Every structure is written in structure tokens, then in C-alpha cells.
Image (spheres, rainbow, N blue to C red):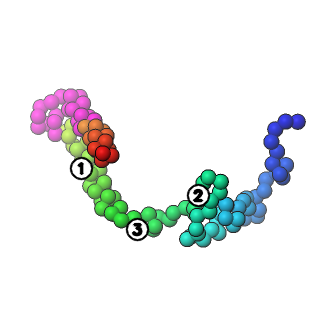
């Protein structure tokens, strides 16, 4: 017979807690890894426990980035929903033409995002 068989013959190894009992590279159960565990080198990979949300929020200047993105999105959504109405009512455009013209705003946003990335990488 060819093929790969597991050590337990393919049987389910979950314990009564629903945990498979598998160990992470530190040799401890994955759910009981200390928060500040040092990295463990396994082969060519460094293994670290997952980062929590509180630790992510402590990244310098991340709050400013989140606030700026929030306000940019408010402006973009306001223009996406309001611009066709404005172009049709105040500028006398047809509804379809106003819708297509407002799509140019989105295309400009895509082009601006790509251009910002290119300029930022230099």
C-alpha cells in the first residue's frame, strides 16, 4: 500500500476540551503560550505568538493614520453619493451622464493611490 499514514492511523486526536493537543514550536500547547515569549527558530522560520490588538494600537503614529483614513473615507463616500445628484440638479446633466462623471472621481482616487505609492517608494 502506498501513501502517507499518520502516527495514530488517521484517528481523531481531539481531547475532551476540543483541543487537538498539538504543540507549537516551543513545545507548549498553542493556547498556553506566554505573551512575551522569545522567538523560537524552527528550521528557517522564526515563530512568535500572535500579536494582540492592544499591542497593535500602541504602534507610533497609527492613531493619526487611522483618523486620517477615517476622514478621507467620509469625504469620498459623501462625494460618491452626493456628486451625481449635484451634477444632475445644479449643472443640468442627465442622470446617466452625472453617474458616469462621478465615476471619474473614483478612477482619480485609484490613480492617485497608485501614484502616491510610487512616489512614496522613492
Q: Residue at x 81, y 48 (%)?
A: 6
Tag count in the figure?
3
Question: What is the secondary structure assignment of the residue under circle 2?
Answer: strand
Q: Which residue is mark 3?
A: 58
Q: Predominant secondary structure in magenta? A: helix
Q: Position of residue 95 (x, y in %)?
A: 21, 31
In the rendering, which numbered label is found on residue 46?
Answer: 2
Q: Which residues are magenta?
A: 86-107
Q: Residue at x 65, y 69 (%)?
A: 32
The local crowd at label 2, few if under 14, some if 14 to 19, many if 20 or more residues have their Cα within 10 Å, is few
Of 68 and 37, the residue lying toward us: 37
The answer to whether residue 65 is seen in the rendering is yes
Q: Position of residue 100 (x, y in %)?
A: 24, 30
Residue at the extreme right: 1
Of 20 and 50, the residue lying toward us: 50
- Tell which circle, 3 or 1, labels the residue nearer the N-terminal end: 3
- Tell which circle, 3 or 2, labels the residue nearer the N-terminal end: 2
Amino acid at each position: 500500500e502506498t501513501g502517507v499514514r499518520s502516527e495514530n492511523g488517521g484517528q481523531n486526536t481531539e481531547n475532551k476540551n476540543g483541543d487537538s493537543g498539538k504543540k507549537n514550536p516551543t513545545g507548549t500547547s498553542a493556547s498556553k503560550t506566554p505573551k512575551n515569549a522569545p522567538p523560537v527558530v524552527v528550521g528557517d522560520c522564526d515563530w512568535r505568538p500572535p500579536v494582540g490588538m492592544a499591542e497593535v494600537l500602541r504602534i507610533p503614529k497609527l492613531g493619526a493614520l487611522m483618523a486620517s483614513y477615517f476622514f478621507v473615507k467620509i469625504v469620498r463616500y459623501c462625494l460618491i453619493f452626493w456628486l451625481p445628484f449635484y451634477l444632475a440638479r445644479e449643472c443640468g446633466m442627465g442622470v446617466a451622464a452625472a453617474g458616469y462623471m462621478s465615476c471619474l472621481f473614483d478612477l482619480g482616487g485609484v490613480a492617485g493611490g497608485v501614484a502616491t505609492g510610487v512616489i512614496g517608494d522613492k
